[in-house]
Image: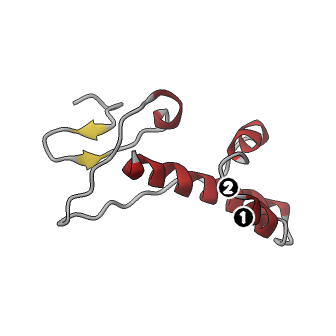
Amino acid sequence: MSEDSIVDESTEVCRPNRFYWESSQEHCHLPNTEIHVFSCALEVAPSNLVNLTRFPSSDELERAQRFRFKRDRMHFIVARAELRMILSLYLI
C-alpha cells in the first residue's frame, strides 16, 4: 500500500490523505467492531478558507460569525467543513 492510499483493503480501515477531498471518489466502511478517529489542521490559507465555506450549512456559518476572534471563526468553519467531508465518506 502506498503512502497516498485512501483505503487499506486488507483491514478495511479508511486512511484519508491530504489530497483525498479533491481527487478521490472512494468511500469508507465502518464495521461494527471498529471506530475511526480523524484529526485535521485548523490553520488554512485564506484562499482555502473561501473554498471551505461552501460545506457548512447557513446555520453553521451564522454560528461562526458569533465568535469574537477571526481565528476562532476560521477554525470553526474549517472544522465543520472537514466534519461534513469526512461524514460524506461514509454515506456514499
Amino acid tagged 1: Glu
Count of all numbered marks drawn on residues in the image:
2
Q: Which residue is mark 2?
A: 56
Amino acid found under the numbered disc labelled 2: Pro
Left or right of 57: which side holds 25? left
Q: Local crowd at mark 2 within 10 Å, few (<14), some, or many (≥20)?
A: many
Q: Is residue 24 above or below residue 85?
A: above
> Which residue is depicted at the point 77% across and 41% down?
50
Answer yes or no: is residue 72 visible.
Answer: no
- On screen, residue 84 versus residue 46, left or right, reads left
Picture residue at 20% right of the left edge, 65% below the top? 32
Q: Disc 2 on helix, strand or loop?
A: loop
The percent position of residue 25, horizontal first and vertical second, equals 41, 32
Vertical side of 12 occupied by 36: above or below: below
- Residue visible at 78% across and 62% down? 73
Q: Quadrant of the C terminus?
A: top left
Q: Quadrant of the N terminus?
A: top left
The answer, for residue 78, to whether it is visible in the render is: yes
**Residue lying at the far left of the rendered structure:** 10
Q: Which mark is residue 84?
A: none
Quarter of the figure with residue 17: top left
- The residue identified by callout 1 is 60
Residue at (38%, 51%) from the top-left corner? 90
Corner quadrant of residue 8: top left
Secondary structure beneath disc 1? helix
Q: How is the image coloured?
A: secondary structure
The reply to whether dot 1 and dot 2 touch (C-beta < 8 Å) is yes
Residue 42 image offset from top left, x and y in percent:
63, 55
Q: CA distance from mark 1 to mark 2?
A: 6 Å
Give residue 61's quadrant in the image: bottom right
